[in-house]
Image: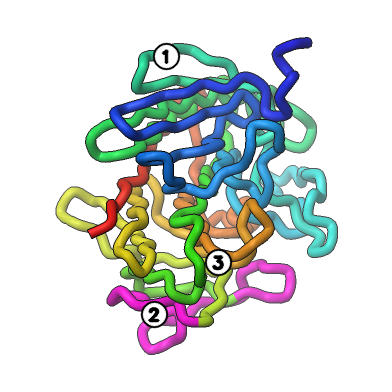
Amino acid sequence: MARWKLPSGAQWTINHRDQHATIVELGGGLREYTVAGQPVAEGYGEHELAGKAAGQVLAPWPNRTGDGQYTVRGETRQLAINEPGKRNAIHGLVRWLSWHRADQTPESVTVAVTLPPSPAYPYPLELAITWSVGEQGLRAEHTVVNLGNQPAPFGLGVHPYLAAGTADPDELVLHAPVTEMLTTDDRSLPVGREPVAGTPFDFASPRAIAGTAFDTTFRGLERDGHGIYRTTVTRPDGSGAELWQDRSFGWVQLYNGTGPSGQPGSVAVEPMTCPPDALRSGEDLIALQPGDRWTGSWGITPIRPS
């Protein structure tokens, strides 16, 4: 019983010099990440549940599934509608499960969970994350294994908020070199796509957000020679954070509404393997074969004041 004296369960801390991160049992996600005592990712208190999906792991699908219904090999499944105002199933099944610690060092912790089969999602998966902090910042390495005897439709995303604590959210500078964005209906489900260039969402060159509101999915990510895509959010003093994602994550969702605190002042940068509604559309949905293993990595590099 003492294990649940905190709403998010056990707290596992990892440290490297002046970097500090806390990973939680409930959902296996990131509760806080600070450098020199200042938040690099906006998190939530130890006596709170994760609000606005802060730091959570989103699997076996990220974002939304319209009506919570999807069909695989002729069988239609019904997920719980947990975004009732829009009639969607949102952000997967593992973010409220109890994860266990599989390994820990002073600078890293590996957490894992088994997602059992259910009528809504009859595909047992084993998920593990190694969280670590080092000279390049925070790193998350994901592994997912299909424990079942049939292919599992699968996607994964994460939901960190960057650059918390600015006095004026409009002064945050965003750099997001992407080429295409999804257009959505009033349920936040995709209905089309269009080029980013020349729109208010064009942050191919770094510039202040300056009143632009977005909760938008992007693809066509500009990657470096190592296959890494980077989104950067900085404050007026030059401090902030860069979120990088490897080729396993072909999409990114950007959101600058109210954060976990209920106030504006941070930007959610969400690496995703697939777009919203992928369980229904099949776009970039992974068909994870029995016994197969999927891996993917992303991380946050702090940018210190100049």
Judging by the rendered image, the residue that carries numbered circle 3 is 256
Q: Are marks 1 and 3 in contact (CB under 8 Å)?
A: no
Q: Is there any visible trace of residue 293 in the rendered image?
A: no
Q: Residues within 10 Å of mark 3 (few under 14, many from 20)?
A: many
- Label 1 Cα crowd, 10 Å radius (few <14 / some 14-19 / many 20+): some
**Residue 210: % across, % down:** 47, 81
- The answer for how far apart the CA atoms under marks 2 and 1 are is 41 Å
Q: Give the mark, 2 or 3, whose residue is nearer the N terminus.
A: 2
Which three-letter amino acid code belongs to the residue tagged 2? Answer: Asp
Which comes sooner in the sequence, label 1 or label 3? 1
Residue 202's tag is 2
- Indicate the quadrant containing the C terminus: top left, top right, bottom left or bottom right: bottom left
Q: Amino acid at mark 3?
A: Asn
Q: Is residue 137 above or below residue 84?
A: above
Amino acid carrying label 1: it is: Gln
Q: Quadrant of residue 79?
A: top right
- The alpha-carbon separation of the residues under discs 2 and 3 comes to 15 Å
Residue 258 placed where, x, y %? 64, 63
Across and down, in percent, residue 58 comes to: 58, 42
Q: Residues within 10 Å of mark 2 (few under 14, many from 20)?
A: many
Q: Residues in magenta? A: 184-210
Q: Position of residue 74 (x, y in %)?
A: 71, 46
Closer-to-camera residue (295/28): 28
